[in-house]
Amino acid sequence: MAGNREFLNRRLHSLLGVIPVGLFLVQHLVVNHFATGGEESFNKAAGFMESLPFRIILETFIIFLPLLFHAIYGLYIAFTAKNNVSKYGFFRNWMFMLQRVSGVITLIFIAWHVWETRVQAAFGADVNFQMMENILSNPFMFWFYIVGVISTIFHFSNGLWSFCVSWGITISPRSQLITTYVTIVIFILLSIVGIRAITAFV
């Protein structure tokens, strides 16, 4: 019974990491990328997201609760996982380990980012271009965001590979190899979007 529960928890953890959390990450990166068009462009995009109907309900049930489960169960996986070189091979074993490390870094980054933006907004602060400009004007915070964003994108991109394997989408070694290349491209493209957005604020 415990084995079945763990199997279901791992499946749910994997699914939520892609849908909806992963999709929200991509959407968030795209909105932030509007900063490359200037302050007005970003504020307009951010304002549109803020004005969505039932935003609090959507954020709670589509973002925060799935993210909370993914993070808590992800920590359990990270601190109980054992690397298996014979099963995954050298490269995939490194990806397995980096997935766990990036998950912890990502959790720290997201918790701080939520504190600096969503929590401050609840106290009346405006989440706009100027807020991010002020945050990223600090060199430490600038590099903290660079590392955090890259870690988050890696965790999502590499997690797509695991998702495809665990859900039986990629079964053969060839399909898994192709998926590796696809997820590397996704990581590079999203990293470019994320880094361009960060540098646009400074």
Image (cartoon, grey):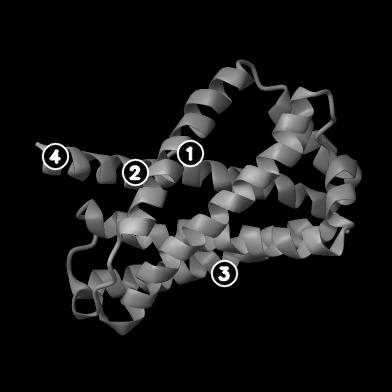
Residues under labels 4 and 1: Cα distance? 23 Å
Q: Nearer the viewer, mark 3 or mark 1?
A: 1
Q: Is residue 192 above or below residue 108?
A: below
Residue 21 visible, this angle: yes
Considering depth in this image, is 39 or 76 the residue closer to the camera? 76
The Cα–Cα distance between marks 3 and 1, rounded to whole angstroms, is 23 Å
The correct choice, above or below, for 87 with respect to 57 in the image is: below
Label 2: which residue?
13
- Mark 2 vs mark 4, foreground winner is 4
Give how far across and how far down residue 183 sits, in percent.
43, 66
Q: Quadrant of residue 83?
A: bottom left
In this view, the residue in front, 168 or 146, is: 146
Q: Position of residue 9 (x, y in %)?
A: 26, 40
Residue 55 drawn at (x, y percent):
62, 21
**Dot 4 corresponds to which residue?**
2
Q: Amino acid at mark 3?
A: Ile
- Relative placement, left or right, of 70 versus 173 is right
Front of the two marks 2 and 3: 2
- Is tag 3's residue or tag 1's residue first in the polypeptide sequence? 1
